[in-house]
Image: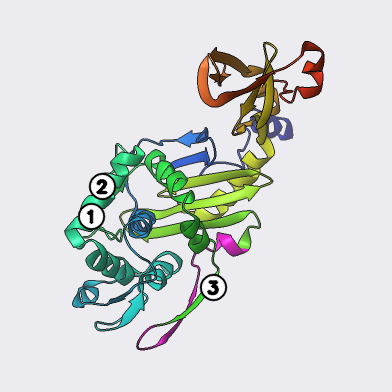
Amino acid sequence: MRKILLFLILLFPINVLADTGRSTIIMDIDSGRILYKNNINERRLIASTTKIMTCIVTLENSDIESSITVGDEVLSMYGTNIYIKPGEVLKIKDLLYGLMLRSGNDASITLAYNTLGYDGFINKMNEKALEIGMKNTLFNNPHGLDEDTKNYSTAYDMALLSRYAYKNSMYRKIISTKKYVTKSSLKSYVWYNRVSLLNNYKNCIGGKNGYTPRAGKTLVSYAKKDDLVLTIVSLNDPSIYENHRTLYNEYFSKYSNYTIVEKGDFVFNNRLYYINSSFKYPLKKDETDRIKTLVKINNKVGEIEIYYDNDIIGNVELYEKSEIKKEKKNLLQKFISLFS
């Protein structure tokens, strides 16, 4: 009997790293490379991860140090709130912290009404989605509640949004904040970040969670190890935090950031060029020999194209500095790479 059980275990191994999300994606923030995908183009309700777009639209279309007065629109909000009242005066910046740390639905609708106007704000959310490349996304509200109006997206589209938002320094500051203290015209507030992964996983550097009965649990998170920054999006995932922690540990152990082209001087055909930016790419150890580089020179400028197999994954520009003597070439050669 023991032999039969052992045979069955070997034949059907238990996958302890099973992804629990209905739709899940892992994307490298720097390059945009997808490291893992599971139903990433399945359109789903996204609950309060909506507020990532609400935050970005606000940051890009307002002076966050300016103050606004809360209107009666907050009276219609339910679910998670920061409990602001009509007539209360707060800075936009404070509302953004309430939006992202406490998932304040009342904060989201106040921001929409007082920045671009409600309809204008929703239109801007959808315009920004198209600009980012979120082709399967539709926003109908700034909060993510889905009883009356609904917001749809995919894990892939939300990863595009996550990567875009991360480029904004104020957004990064907000989502990485564990505790925020502020005052309005009426009272004081102390808000703690609801994304528990920020306290329970050392590599986590921020995120936004969400939940409705229709959408299930959703989470967009970020984690960093060495110089590799990843984002994970999971939609309809009953174990969002444990799933993200497990996936981060697995993929940080598999991938490292490799510098394929380094910023600085570069010698080609006895001429000295300058590379104005480095190019890094996440790779497994057994993938390094699949990277190739192609140098193209046109007069005094050019570029280095980087390929993974036959697919171009990036390029960097070259600028000529001067002609050099052949005997000096080895001393000035700074482009030393296994990927050439």
Q: Which of disc 3 and disc 1 is earlier in sequence?
A: 1
The amino acid type of the residue labelled 3 equals Lys
Residue at disc 3, secondary structure: strand
- Residue 55: name its quadrant: bottom left
Disc 1 crowd, CA 10 A, few/some/many (<14, 14-19, 20+): many
For label 1, the residue is 122
Residue at disc 2, secondary structure: helix
For label 3, the residue is 179
Residue 266 visible? The answer is yes
The segment highlighted magenta reads 184-199
For label 2, the residue is 126
Labels in figure, total: 3
Residue placed at 52% from the left, 33% from the top? 33
Q: Is mark 2 in CB contact (under 8 Å) with mark 1? A: yes
Foreground residue among 176 and 340: 340
Foreground residue among 54 and 295: 295
Give the spatial CA distance, label 3 vs label 2.
31 Å
User: Which quarter of the figure is the N terminus placed in?
Assistant: top right
Residue placed at 20% from the left, 63% from the top? 117
The amino acid type of the residue labelled 1 equals Ile
- Residue 96: name its quadrant: bottom left
The amino acid type of the residue labelled 2 equals Asn
Q: Position of residue 165 (x, y in %)?
A: 44, 50
Give the spatial CA distance, label 1 vs label 3.
29 Å
